[in-house]
């Protein structure tokens, strides 16, 4: 009797804490959304050319062709949106790969996206720089090609995540050797390659945005449909199979989708692989590992972070611009370590 | 209802199970026993379609399990693997709710019926009071019951258990096996499990299958299997068998075997000589 009463009280307390946890997660999503909007506004308002906030609003709302409108509409807005969408692509890719391989070190780099795109871009920029405009499509093909190669090499009666990761490391090292060889043989042309290798958003325009958005939106929708499957995959292959999940096929779809998203992003802005590794971890530390919340949170946090970092990259050493990849790593890594050391109270893990 | 026909399977070139024939009847509670490497877990993995056979096939209700829709099978057959893992921040109820996966459409939306089944599974596994706790904070026995609840949420007719009591203390082992027994007795779920402890197998199964070198050495009721002759032939151990009159089942204690007492004393003598 007494025992039962205690159990009932405990159950009620637990229920209460579950409700609180749900509220906490929804609040986090809301905060991230606000951060996203804030980053967008900041990114559009700040830059080499000073425009006040009211002028920004006026330039966007009123249709008259002023210099302000020219700058905001043709320079800052596309660049900001490219930053945001790249952030979404890379961080979604990372979160899916970490889920599907059950490995915290998985990132777009591990399935060869970075090295594949890198080698393709370097070949174009170094060997035939006259065709520089082919960098984007070639990098895209290179990235997907490297993933397919790694998947093929790791296949043996199905895909074992560990073997996939090892094959990924080996292929990346091989392609990396190719990149380095080209850079050594053509030292005079290295300069043109550097921006691609660190990742930068300078001079990104609507053209780039139009490449990005179909993949981003498509990927985002597909990712939302796969959240339940990702959760089940985290219980291990045996349990997932027992629950009627086609493990091999699901894994292939997820890796393919992750590769596609990362390839798109990388071919447009260069090798920003770090985003895909670290943003999912940051979000997981804050919101937990349930993909129902993790996927939207990661997408928003990735977008907000990249837009904010790009603004910082443009403004801090004005008029010189730092490549966003450097800012991302320099600010992101310490912040990530802060989270890792328990800087934010982990309500989720309790 | 579940049948392995001429089943051969293994890993790579290493054939673990050789042309095995086994039929499991509805309502049975079968334990598979055998020495290390005899193919117990491999057989269970084949039944749960985690391992494709190299020869022969496995039939569920007369149809090969590799030709049926995997979700349809998941509604009939549930598995609890040896040491399943779970993310640190999943609650018991989260975990159990994944058992509804085979019944959900592609959107993953759960209806009233699904919630009712989850409630039922949670209370059938007697973890009502734990359902809002994090799985990572549960004790071994509680965790195993949570996994059983997940399997129950699939509303299976057959439940496969791979060493459900390994790593548990004796109290938890008892608790889990009693629960499994009640699932068989009260809900009529057919149980197929692998156990290491033969005394537990003798007490908790209706029939026992003995594997040796990937083949069925013998099958029958516990009192036919737990005998001095069989255990010596399979495990190379001399035992003395008694009757547990309370539970009406046999039990045994080992008295000697591969390393019998005489050899041990011989060894001790040798050591003493060396020390001198």
Image (cartoon, rainbow, N blue to C red):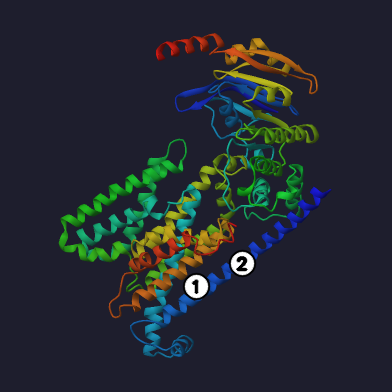
Q: Seen in the image, is A240 located left or right of residue A341?
A: right
x, y (%) of residue A150?
38, 45
Q: Residue at x 17, y 55 (%)?
A: A184
x, y (%) of residue A272?
36, 62
Residue placed most toward the observer, B219 or A119: B219
Tell me the element at label 2.
helix
Q: Nearer the viewer, mark 2 or mark 1?
A: 2
x, y (%) of residue B129?
74, 50
Question: Which residue does the numbered mark 2 point to in the structure image?
Answer: A26
Q: Which mark is residue B145?
A: none
The relative height of residue A334 versus residue B28 in the rendered view (above or below) is below
Q: Seen in the image, is B178 located left or right of residue A296?
A: right
Q: Residue at x 36, y 89 (%)?
A: A67
Tell me the element at label 1.
helix
Residue A90 visible in image: no
**Placement of the C terminus of chain A among the 4 image quadrants:** bottom right
Return the disc, 2 or 1, that comes first in the chain's sequence.
2
Q: Residue at x 73, y 24 (%)?
A: B203
Question: Which residue does the numbered mark 1 point to in the structure image?
Answer: A36
Chain of the residue displaying label 1:
A
Q: Seen in the image, is B165 located left or right of residue B14?
A: right
**Mark 2 Cα-neighbour bin, 10 Å: few <14, some 14–19, many ≥20:** some
Residue placed most toward the observer, A113 or A285: A285
Q: Residue at x 59, y 61 (%)?
A: A347
Quarter assignment of residue B42: top right
x, y (%) of residue A194?
25, 64
The relative height of residue B27 versus residue A297 in the rendered view (above or below) is above
């Amino acid at each position: 009797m007494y025992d039962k009463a205690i159990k009932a009280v405990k159950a009620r307390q637990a229920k209460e804490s579950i409700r609180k946890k749900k509220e906490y997660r929804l609040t986090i999503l809301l905060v991230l959304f606000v951060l996203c909007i804030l980053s967008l506004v900041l990114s559009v308002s700040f830059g080499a050319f000073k425009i006040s906030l009211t002028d920004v609003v006026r330039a966007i709302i009123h249709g008259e062709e002023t210099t302000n409108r020219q700058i905001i509409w043709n320079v800052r807005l596309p660049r900001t949106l490219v930053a945001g969408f790249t952030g979404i692509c890379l961080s979604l890719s990372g979160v899916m790969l970490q889920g599907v391989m059950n490995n915290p070190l998985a990132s777009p780099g591990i399935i060869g996206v970075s090295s594949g795109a890198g080698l393709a871009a370097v070949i174009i920029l170094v060997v035939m720089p006259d065709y520089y405009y082919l960098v984007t499509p070639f990098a895209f093909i290179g990235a997907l090609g490297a993933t397919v190669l790694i998947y093929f090499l790791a296949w043996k009666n199905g895909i074992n995540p560990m073997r996939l990761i090892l094959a990924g490391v080996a292929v990346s090292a091989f392609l990396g050797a190719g990149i380095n060889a080209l850079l050594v043989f053509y030292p005079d042309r290295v300069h043109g390659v550097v921006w691609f290798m660190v990742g930068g958003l300078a001079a990104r325009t609507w053209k780039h945005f139009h490449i990005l958005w179909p993949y981003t939106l498509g990927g985002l929708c597909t990712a939302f449909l796969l959240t339940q499957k990702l959760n089940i995959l985290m219980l291990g292959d045996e349990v997932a199979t027992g629950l009627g999940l086609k493990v091999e096929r699901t894994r292939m779809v997820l890796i393919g989708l992750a590769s596609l998203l990362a390839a798109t992003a990388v071919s447009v802005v260069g090798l920003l692989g770090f985003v895909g590794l670290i943003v999912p971890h940051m979000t997981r530390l804050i919101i937990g590992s349930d993909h129902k919340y993790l996927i939207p949170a990661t997408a928003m946090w990735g977008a907000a972070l990249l837009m904010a970092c790009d603004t910082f990259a443009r403004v801090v050493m004005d008029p010189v611009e730092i490549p966003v990849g450097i800012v991302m790593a320099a600010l992101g890594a310490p912040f990530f370590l802060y989270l890792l050391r328990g800087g934010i109270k982990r309500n989720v893990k309790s | 209802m579940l049948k392995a026909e001429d089943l051969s399977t293994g890993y790579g070139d290493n054939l673990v199970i050789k042309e095995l024939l086994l039929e499991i009847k509805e309502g049975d509670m079968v334990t598979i026993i055998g020495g290390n490497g005899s193919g117990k877990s491999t057989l269970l993995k084949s039944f749960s379609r985690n391992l494709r056979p190299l020869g022969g096939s496995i039939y569920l209700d007369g149809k090969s399990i590799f030709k049926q829709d995997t979700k349809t099978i998941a509604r009939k057959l549930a598995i609890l693997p040896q040491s399943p893992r779970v993310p640190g921040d999943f609650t018991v109820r989260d975990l159990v709710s994944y058992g509804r996966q085979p019944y959900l459409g592609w959107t993953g939306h759960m209806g009233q019926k699904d919630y009712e089944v989850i409630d039922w599974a949670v209370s059938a596994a007697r973890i009502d009071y734990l359902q809002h706790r994090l799985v990572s904070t549960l004790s071994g026995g509680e965790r195993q019951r949570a996994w059983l609840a997940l399997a129950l949420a699939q509303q299976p007719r057959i439940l496969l258990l791979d060493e459900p009591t390994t790593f548990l203390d004796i109290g938890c082992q008892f608790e889990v096996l009693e629960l499994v027994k009640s699932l068989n007795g009260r809900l009529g779920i057919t149980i197929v499990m692998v156990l290491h402890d033969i005394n537990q197998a003798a007490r908790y199964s209706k029939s026992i299958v003995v594997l040796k070198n990937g083949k069925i050495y013998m099958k029958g009721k516990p009192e036919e299997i737990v005998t001095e002759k069989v255990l010596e032939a399979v495990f190379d151990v001399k035992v003395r068998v008694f009757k547990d009159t309370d539970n009406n089942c046999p039990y045994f204690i080992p008295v000697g075997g591969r390393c019998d007492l005489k050899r041990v004393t011989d060894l001790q003598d040798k050591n003493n000589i060396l020390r001198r």
